[in-house]
Amino acid sequence: MIAIFTALMPIFLVIALGIGLRRWLAPDVTFWRTVERITYFVLFPSLLVTP
């Protein structure tokens, strides 16, 4: 049970961090579009290439 918890906890923390940033910082829509593009074109491919 603890293994499942430790595996899933980082995922929920990242989701909560995104929700918190969106709610309290409230940047405009163009900021989030830029973040999504960086995530899609830079961060996600780096996960695929990492050995």
Image (cartoon, rainbow, N blue to C red):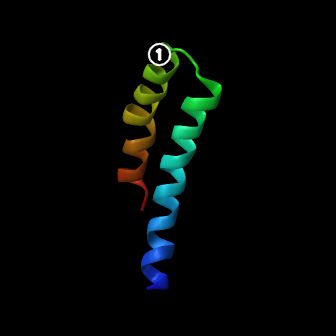
Instruction: Work out which residue is located at the far bottom of the displayed protein and give it.
Output: 1
The residue nearer to you, when weighing 29 against 49, is 29
The residue nearer to you, when weighing 13 against 42, is 13
Give left or right: position of 37 versus 13.
left
The residue nearer to you, when weighing 42 against 24, is 24
Percent x, y of residue 18: 52, 40
Quadrant position of the N terminus in the picture: bottom left
Crowd around label 1: few <14 · some 14–19 · many ≥20 (10 Å): few
Residue displayed at 41% across by 51% down: 47
Q: Picture quarter containing residue 22? A: top right
Q: What element carries label 1?
A: helix
- Pointer 1 residue: 29
Give left or right: position of 29 versus 20.
left
Residue displayed at 45% across by 41% down: 43
Instruction: Work out which residue is located at the far front of the displayed protein and give it.
Output: 23
Quadrant position of the C terminus in the picture: bottom left
Percent x, y of residue 20: 58, 39
Name the kind of residue labelled 1 in the image: Val
Percent x, y of residue 14: 52, 50
Residue displayed at 35% across by 52% down: 48
